[in-house]
Amino acid sequence: MNAGSHAAPKDPVGAWLAKTFPHQHVLRAEIAADLRRCPFLQVDPPNKSLFGHVVELAIGLSLCDQSPYLGLLHCLDHDLANRLLTIAGYRPTVDLAAPYDAWRRTDSALHPAHIFTAASRLAHVHSLLNDLGRHRSDAGDVARLVLKQHPRLLNSHPHETYRTRRGFRTVWSSYSSGFHSALRSFGPATAQLSLLDGHRHADFLLGTTVLELKSGRLDDDRYLDELIGQIMTYSLLAHHDGHRVTHVAVYAARYQRLLRYRIDELANRLAGTPIDLTSSGAHLATLIRDWPYRRSVA
């Protein structure tokens, strides 16, 4: 038995993306050059992963007309979930007993302190679900029980909360200065768009634009290669799933930059030849479904 016999098989999805779109390096170089010219926000949160979730959830809460992140809300005590939706600017369409998906945004103003409170609580739920999901298929039910018994899990240490809030204020000030309006102009928002029966999730669908949010650094080729793989995967799967998508966008929050591309033009450019989005999306979907490891490259 040779030394590599136990190595994980090569990712067929990544291999297909590289073969189908061999000119990704050109886009990578362009994005890198673009971002180097952007004013970079200097924030240093104590937990970068949690901070990224807070920023994403806060933006989702600010963009969606109907309450998003129902899976996270259902892990919480009903009264707490109601309070979080209320401070994030949502109200029930009937009464307080209405299901969360019946809550609608009524407050168009952005209140950063309120949004931060709701997003940070949901970010802790998200982290707990991720940890449980690695080992249990009933992660949502278990998370609900755990949080009922240990509600303090929804809060960071005060010092970490202070630093996270401070970094959030910096990013939020930039976001609310013009990016919020720009993203709203793309169309109605769906957060955590489930693709291919949950095999992948895009951060947002805004009208006909698939949006990927990046709250961290993008100063390494590996990060940009992953980003390009993500936007191509999400746009093809969204097309395959029947969503009327025309564009794909990237909001690099720390770089204060919003990039947007027509999907058909971008696919043709990266491939170096005309691409059939329908057949390409179907082939990619088959690869993802058939790969037993289900390891996400996007």
Image (cartoon, grey):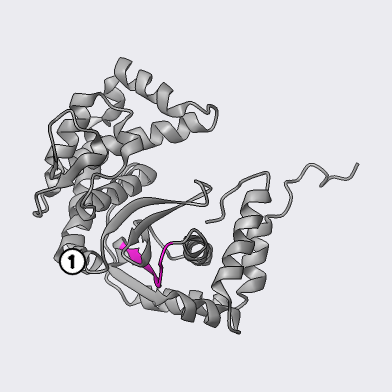
Q: Is residue 163 visible?
A: no
**Residue at 42% from the left image edge and 64% from the top image edge:** 218
State whether the magenta stretch is mostly helix, strand or loop.
strand
Nearest the eye: 260 or 82: 82
Q: Image check: 266 left or right of 57?
A: right
Residue 166 belongs to the span the image colors magenta: no
The relative height of residue 79 versus residue 185 in the rendered view (above or below) is above
Q: Is residue 209 visible?
A: yes
Residue 246 belongs to the span the image colors magenta: yes
List x then y, in percent, for residue 295.
Answer: 60, 47
Secondary element at image label 1: helix
List x then y, in percent, for residue 231.
Answer: 47, 65
* Span highlighted in magenta in the image: 243-252
Please rate how many residues cluster around mark 1, counting C-alpha atoms within 10 Å: few if below 14, some from 14 to 19, many from 20.
Answer: few
**Residue at 60% from the left image edge and 62% from the top image edge:** 282
**Residue at 48% from the left image edge and 26% from the top image edge:** 138
Q: Which residue is mark 1?
A: 181
- Quarter placement of the N terminus: top right
